[in-house]
Image (cartoon, helix red, strand yellow):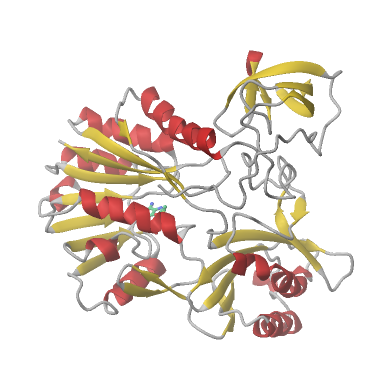
Amino acid sequence: MASAEGKFRIRRPNTRPNPRPVAAGPPVEIRIETVGAQGDGVAAHGVFAPLTLPGELVLATVSGGRGEVLQVIEPSPQRVEPPCPHFGVCGGCALQHWDPAPYLDWKVEQIRLALGRERIETELLSPFAVPPQSRRRVALHARRGSSKDTARLGFKERRSWNLVPIQVCPVSHPRLVAAFPALARMAAPLLEHPKSAPTLHVTLTDAGLDIDISGVEGKYSGGLSADARMRVAEAAAAADFARVTLDGDMLYGARTPSVRIGPATVALPPGAFLQAVPQAEQAMAQFAVEALAGAGQVADLFCGVGAFALRLAATAGVLAIDSADGAVKALASARATAPGLKAIAVQTRDLSKRPLLAQEMTKLDGVLFDPPRAGAAEQAVEIAASRLSRVVGVSCNPATFARDARILADAGFVLERVLPVDQFLWSPHVELVGVFSR
Ligand SMILES: C[S@@+](CC[C@H](N)C(=O)[O-])C[C@H]1O[C@@H](n2cnc3c(N)ncnc32)[C@H](O)[C@@H]1O
């Protein structure tokens, strides 16, 4: 098992008061009982207190069921010094103050609780946890800086739309962090329209940084001025970025951004989905490939650019389907870069409106589905009605996964085992891969 330990694990108790206390009633002492699904401590009577841990006695102002902690009176022995100076203000992380072992146990417990609500029991395997500095994708927000020609770049504040300017991020790959100043320089011309609130979706690829920008006003009423476009391109060239696009349209292109997925090289379409951490992608894919071993023909539903399909195709023919046409085409082209692979047939199709039907699965030996957070209820109904006996589900939302697992369980499937994956380090989110059979 990989772990989130290492240079960021500091065991000194942190009794820093919350940097953003809000005025509410008079301060009261509250005892934290547990940590809720969003990563906040929970005290008696359902009072949520961010940045606290089970067992702690804290002094907090309480308003509308939310406590803002002024002081940790009795810190938990599991409290550790958060590695990031922005922690507590930045909304990106919720749980840096928790020792890695109970933190990981809590993540696994979130899966057990979600499945329990659907009366599903399973074997929860030892979790795979990504290390710090491994995230290859971030969404950074840009706002006007101190002068017209500068921009501030950062993440959203905890429980606010305000921006926290970010200098460091222990979650992100160091090459992303090193590019923050250059990204801020490139963002300045994006703010020429007063209503623009740009978000830079930045992906570290094998060819360098790929940036897709959204939230720029005026694009369809004249768009960025020619001058702003030129300044963006100049900043991108100076920083040696691979590509910059605005809502998918090219602003600057030096090289085609690409990533290795299994044996193939995938040329990424602008804004394409990619698993946030390559080590997590690798671990999930390996687990899924093992679960479907021996199958001659499989489907990869919600395939994206092929994180699973391109690895499954080492031993099985694959039918790969996604609603994002650019991703599907990129997957089809990537297949040609790895000559040893079996055939990959691709389809662009909305699987919520037009799920792969049970009768379309008659030639399949197994199916993998990896939907967005909303889950794959419509698709699960068709899998349930099929003759399939081997299914792998991948999900970043245990609640919708459990709902879909219930549909399969009602049709005789057993959820044999689940691999929890801590892909979103120090956030309350948890990813999982589940193996079903009947
Ligand atoms: C969590 S991503 C998984 C992608 C891929 N399996 C991977 O690991 O990189 C979910 C994918 O579902 C696709 N998607 C979202 N809604 C869809 C729908 N209604 N029908 C088909 N695909 C959809 C997205 O384009 C995205 O590629």
* 367 sits to left or right of 87: left
Please state the horizontal and vertical placement of residue 323, each as a whole percent of the image: 37, 59
Residue at image location 67% in from the left, 48% down from the top: 83
Residue at image location 79% in from the left, 67% down from the top: 151
Residue at image location 33% in from the left, 70% down from the top: 331
Which image quarter: residue 120? top left
Where 105 sits versus 307, above or below? Answer: above
Residue 356 visible, this orientation? no
* 254 sits to left or right of 366: right
Please name whichever residue, 289 or 203, is drawn nearer the observer in this view of the structure. 289
Where 11 sits versus 326, above or below? Answer: above
Residue at image location 24% in from the left, 30% down from the top: 409
Dividing the image into four equal quarters, which quarter contains ligand 1?
Answer: bottom left
* 374 sits to left or right of 426: left
Where 79 sits versus 372, above or below? Answer: above
Q: Quadrant of the C terminus?
A: top left
Please state the horizontal and vertical placement of residue 290, each as a whole percent of the image: 22, 52
Please name whichever residue, 302 or 27, is drawn nearer the observer in this view of the structure. 27
Residue 336 visible, this orientation? yes
* 90 sits to left or right of 332: right
Please name whichever residue, 3 or 150, is drawn nearer the observer in this view of the structure. 3
Where 435 sits versus 295, above or below? Answer: above
Which image quarter: residue 111? top left
